[in-house]
Image (cartoon, helix red, strand yellow):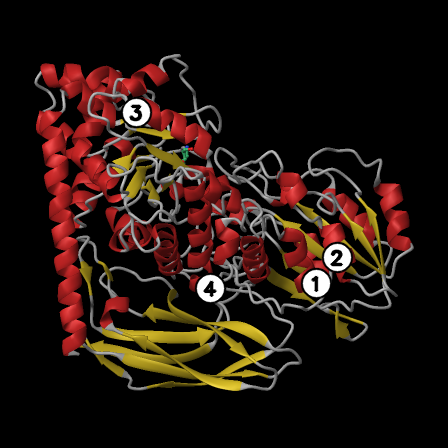
């Protein structure tokens, strides 16, 4: 104990000392800087590709870099390119290096499953490792900073950006945010394999009205604080170096000019010491928002609110000097923003060696790295969710046998390559050669006495049915069919909101045509968001939701099809029955007129034309084996508000035929509150492995901290009273107990 304390004291001492050194260095540098040079540090430009907004080509970027008028670049990939620009930056009067930022969202050179897919693994260690590897690869290519993790809570699958986050739940989202920040930043900035994380988009971007990207957000401060801000707070507490503004207005004030978010919450209440970058052009966009009169006014509002770096709008570059000269912006405000950025450059080690991320040897070693690819397969299998596995001839269809079968693979993803990458994959010219197709991956696993035939059937997105006849013939000549359908990579992601979430084009028609052959069908769905496929869900015996799994999609899917890995994924977001149910999420309120069940329609909160329940619930996912969760016991039925705790224990038994992993989930419900409380709230989960026939007791610890919520004065409080507690394998968990929180 004594030893631990002295190590802790020593660590604090070292951190404080190096913090003081950084402060001294940066203050000294600041004192030498002209106003133009300071404003230059707040200016970020894009490189030559990867635009997600208007590119202003002024033909002068390189000159400006030489003059010290640019602080950071994005979309510049590769050691040769970053080195060239860094050399220009070092020609500036004070030789201040550039920071290179990039959207490293789900892998870099090796593409991992999209973040929503990875979250379905509920495996925080793996999620952290995925970010770690992505950081290592990106750093090897000269990148210092990723614009990730996206920690926006998203309850609306029409919003294309659901694919980039951790889904609908605040508790799970906060845990995943921490894992990703830790992964990107590794053992700390200053290590050449650590890159700065950027928690985005601050804030409430995921609640865009109607699920339409960039749209307004209007919500109570209570809801904002309770549901949307905690993942940001968790990321900040985990040491996230930066945050990014969101495009939306929040209760009428654009997030980029929102002093409540940036000054009050982030920089004051949370004591955030990093810097805030705008989203692409979002400072200038305060003009069309109708919040700023012109770009001069936009720059004033953004810097005053607390936005430190301007990504691509040029509002700071063109207006900050004038604003200072006009007496509207105190230099101290600019100094604060510049200091925050310079400190990060210092922490990254760029002042001692601006080229420390420019190592050609390292870059080469990170291309086609076998370990990273095998990790992509490992996290790929764990991201897959088994939605259906009904018996055919008395036996669940999956897993498939590798012998004695003639299998037909049908669908536009069968021989696809980069379509499995999905949105935000960093494109490289040789990408498609690095990908083993699903077809080849399945073929590679089959025994000699089994065979695979293939037919594309249709394209992802058009109305062409001319390949149907051939696909039908292929199905008829096989014993069973694996159908692979889904969304094209540009159908979920930024600016990819959809009003219809059905399988695009004629894919469902193709599915019905093949199903009519009476061959057993296994359906694979590749997508970035929850799609709606009710006919398939009700008719097709086996369905695997495979998201967009990345470089190793083919092998990962084949592993699950043949039972090399027993699927354990659980949905991190609710799957609706129709678009009309959206927004739909598990932790809603009860209302004053709750329906008893899906058939209860008389003057209760329900739809007269469809059940209120979702198609697939949050936390849901099947396994090839069967888990029984029972014998719930609480260590006490009372918890003291001060330092109390309760342990909830259950027995989990693998009573099926396969070894496997289960995600055991704990939910609470506060029965009465000074504000109404959700019908369920996730407050714990554990992923465990059990061999066939094995049992294990697992214990969750609940403390008053997990029971806190925001009251109507936006205070984070505990309130005494009665709680229900549920444990099970999804948000529908039926095992239940009760306890009270007492003074
Ligand atoms: C706009 C997106 O909203 C943001 O997430 C991304 O990081 C930037 N563009 C940079 O590409």
Disc 4 from disc 1: Cα separation: 21 Å
In which quadrant of the rendered view does residue 83 lie? Answer: top left
Q: Residue at x 44, y 43 (%)?
A: 140
Mark 1, residue position: 561
Within 10 angstroms of label 3, few (less than 14), some, or many (20 or more) residues?
many
Mark 2, residue position: 442
Earlier residue among tags 3 and 1 = 3
Question: Which element type, helix, strand or loop, lies under badge 1?
Answer: helix
Disc 2 from disc 4: Cα separation: 26 Å
Disc 1 from disc 2: Cα separation: 9 Å
Check the image and report above or below for 80 versus 387. above
Earlier residue among tags 1 and 2 = 2
Q: Which is nearer the eye, 163 or 560?
A: 560
Q: Nearer the viewer, mark 4 or mark 3?
A: 3
Image coords of residue 101 (percent x, y): 37, 35
Mark 4, residue position: 123
Q: Residue at x 12, y 19 (%)?
A: 324
Mark 3, residue position: 89
Question: Which element type, helix, strand or loop, lies under badge 3?
Answer: helix
Question: Which element type, helix, strand or loop, lies under badge 4?
Answer: loop
Q: Nearer the viewer, mark 1 or mark 2?
A: 2
Identify the disc placed on residue 383.
none
Earlier residue among tags 2 and 4 = 4
Q: Is residue 11 visible?
A: yes
Position of residue 680 in the picture relative to residue 569 (left or right): left
In which quadrant of the rendered view does residue 498 lie? Answer: top right
Earlier residue among tags 4 and 1 = 4
Mark 2 CB in 8 Å range of ligand 1? Answer: no
Check the image and report above or below for 647 versus 684. below
Question: Which element type, helix, strand or loop, lies under badge 2?
Answer: helix
Ligand 1 position by quadrant: top left
């Amino acid at each position: 104990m004594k030893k631990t304390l002295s190590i802790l004291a020593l660590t604090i001492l070292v951190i404080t000392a190096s913090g003081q050194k950084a402060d001294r260095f940066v203050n000294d540098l600041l004192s030498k800087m002209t106003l133009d040079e300071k404003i230059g540090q707040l200016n970020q430009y894009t490189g030559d590709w990867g635009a997600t907004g208007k590119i202003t080509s002024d033909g002068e970027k390189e000159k400006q870099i030489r003059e010290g008028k640019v602080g950071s670049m994005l979309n510049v990939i590769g050691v040769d390119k970053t080195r060239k620009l860094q050399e220009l930056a070092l020609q500036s009067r004070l030789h201040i290096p550039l920071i290179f930022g990039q959207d490293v969202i789900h892998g870099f050179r090796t593409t991992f499953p999209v973040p929503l897919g990875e979250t379905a693994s509920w495996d925080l260690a793996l999620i952290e490792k995925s970010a770690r590897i992505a950081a290592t690869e990106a750093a090897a290519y000269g990148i210092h900073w990723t614009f990730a993790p996206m920690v926006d809570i998203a309850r609306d699958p029409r919003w294309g950006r659901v694919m980039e986050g951790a889904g609908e739940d605040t508790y799970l989202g906060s845990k995943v945010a921490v894992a990703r920040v830790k992964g990107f930043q590794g053992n700390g900035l200053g290590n050449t394999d650590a890159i700065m994380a950027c928690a985005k988009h601050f804030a409430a971007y995921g609640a865009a009205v109607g699920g339409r990207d960039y749209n307004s957000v209007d919500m109570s401060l209570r809801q904002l604080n309770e549901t949307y801000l905690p993942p940001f707070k968790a990321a900040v507490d985990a040491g996230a170096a930066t945050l990014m503004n969101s495009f939306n207005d929040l209760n009428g004030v654009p997030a980029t000019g929102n002093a409540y978010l940036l000054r009050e919450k982030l920089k004051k209440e949370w004591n955030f010491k990093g810097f805030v970058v705008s989203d692409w052009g979002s400072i200038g966009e305060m003009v069309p928002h109708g919040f700023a009169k012109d770009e001069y006014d936009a720059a004033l509002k953004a810097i005053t609110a607390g936005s430190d770096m301007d990504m691509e709008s040029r509002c700071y570059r063109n207006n900050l000097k004038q604003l200072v000269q006009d007496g509207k912006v105190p230099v101290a405000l600019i100094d604060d923003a510049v200091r925050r950025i310079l400190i990060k450059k210092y922490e990254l080690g760029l002042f001692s060696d601006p080229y420390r991320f420019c190592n050609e040897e390292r870059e080469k070693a990170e291309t086609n790295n076998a370990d990273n690819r095998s990790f992509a397969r490992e996290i790929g299998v764990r991201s897959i969710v088994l939605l259906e596995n009904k018996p055919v001839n008395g036996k669940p269809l999956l897993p498939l046998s590798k012998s004695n079968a003639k299998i037909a693979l049908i669908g536009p993803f069968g021989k696809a390559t980069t379509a499995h990458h999905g949105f935000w994959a960093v494109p490289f010219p040789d990408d498609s050669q690095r990908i083993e197709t699903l077809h080849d991956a399945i073929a590679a696993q089959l025994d000699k006495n089994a065979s695979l035939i293939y037919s594309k059937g249709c394209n992802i997105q058009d109305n062409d049915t001319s390949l149907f006849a051939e696909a039908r013939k292929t199905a008829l000549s096989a014993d069973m069919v694996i159908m692979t359908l889904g969304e094209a990579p540009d159908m979920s992601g930024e600016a990819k909101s959809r009003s219809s979430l059905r399988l695009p084009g004629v894919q469902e028609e193709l599915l019905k045509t093949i199903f009519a052959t009476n061959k057993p069908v296994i359906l694979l769905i590749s997508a970035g968001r929850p799609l709606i496929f009710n006919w398939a869900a009700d008719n097709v015996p086996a369905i695997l939701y495979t998201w967009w799994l990345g470089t190793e999609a083919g092998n990962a899917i084949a592993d699950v099809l043949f039972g090399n890995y027993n699927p354990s994924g659980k949905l991190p977001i609710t799957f609706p029955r129709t678009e009309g149910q959206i927004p739909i999420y598990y932790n809603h309120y009860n209302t004053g007129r709750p329906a008893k069940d899906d058939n209860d329609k008389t003057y209760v909160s329900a739809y007269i034309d469809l059940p209120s329940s979702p198609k697939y619930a949050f936390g849901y996912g099947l396994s090839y084996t069967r888990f029984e969760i029972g014998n719930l016991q609480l260590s006490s039925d009372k918890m003291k508000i001060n330092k109390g705790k309760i342990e909830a224990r259950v027995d989990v038994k693998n009573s099926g035929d396969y070894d496997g992993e289960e995600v055991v989930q704990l939910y609470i419900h506060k029965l009465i509150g000074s504000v109404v409380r959700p019908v369920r709230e996730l407050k714990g989960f554990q992923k465990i492995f059990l061999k066939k026939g094995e049992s294990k007791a697992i214990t969750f610890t609940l403390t008053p901290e997990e029971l806190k919520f925001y009251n109507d004065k936006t205070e984070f409080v505990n309130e005494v009273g009665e709680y229900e507690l549920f444990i099970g394998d999804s948000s529908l968990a039926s095992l239940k107990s009760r306890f009270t929180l007492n003074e």
